[in-house]
Amino acid sequence: SEIGGTPILIHTVRKLAASPEVAEIYVALRANEIAGFQARLKADQELSARKIELVEGGEHRQQSVAHAIDAVRAAADDIVLVHDAVRPFVTEEIIHDVIEAAQKYGAAIAAMPAMDTIKQVERTSEGAVITATLPRERVVMAQTPQGFRYSVLKRAFDEATADGFLGTDEASLVERSGHEVAVVMGSPRNIKITTPADMELAEFFLKR
């Protein structure tokens, strides 16, 4: 999908490419999308100068990220960021803060404080019943980038693969492998574009 006539993924890659702290970019794509995207990158003055590798994605997010990690050549304490292709409004500041926290703690994500009251529910055949109200100050809404020391991320992925564990994001794999994950402030504009309403908001942000 496009915003402002340009594919969302191009907007997102440009944001990462604009950060002086990002050395290499790996993009996981469907096999049939690789050639077309390669051509787009070559035609883009700003992006054609950057080291951007295209890898074939997998069935789901975790597999796609695993393929990209396998393609990366990194030292144990290099920082690897994982970012959603559909979050084109990430800022240089958020990227910097996640990298800095990942260097310090080994693992960090961008997140926003929860604005709504969060209810824990139990699903029933009729619908759902509330079992608890979670204190807002103890809940955050995860965003990306999520940043990790290469050794921490690699170990978490290897363990998840060995155990057949599927997590909702990279931090969940790292938490599961026993490593603490720090949280830095994201942005309410760092939205994930997944619905038509998100597209409308994205067009609005782009015009601003």
Image (spheres, grey):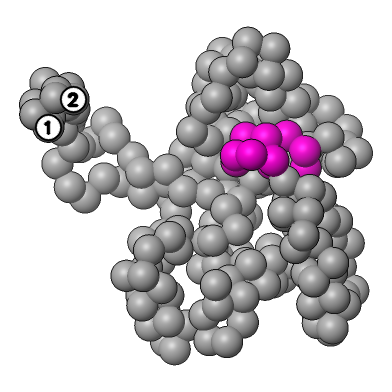
Task: Kindly indicate the quadrant of the structure image that contains residue 54.
Answer: bottom right
Query: Going 51% across and 68% down the picture, which residue do you hit?
Result: 89
Query: Going 42% across and 87% down the picture, which residue do you hit?
Result: 208
Check disc 1: other Cα within 10 Å, few if <14, some if 14-19, many if 20+: few
Secondary structure of the residue carrying tag 2 is strand
Q: Amino acid at mark 2?
A: Arg
Residue linked to disc 1? 127
Residue linked to disc 2? 123
Residue 184 is situated, as x and y percent measured from the top left of the image, at: 47, 45
**Would residue 76 be visible to someone looking at this image?**
yes
Q: Quadrant of the N terminus?
A: bottom right
First to last magenta residue range: 58-68
**Would residue 102 be visible to someone looking at this image?**
no
Q: Is residue 69 magenta?
A: no
Q: Is residue 88 above or below residue 106?
A: below
**Do the CB atoms of the residues marked 1 and 2 lie less than 8 Å apart?**
yes
Q: Which residue is at the front of the view, 110 or 28?
A: 28
Secondary structure of the residue carrying tag 1 is strand
Q: Is residue 137 above or below residue 32?
A: above
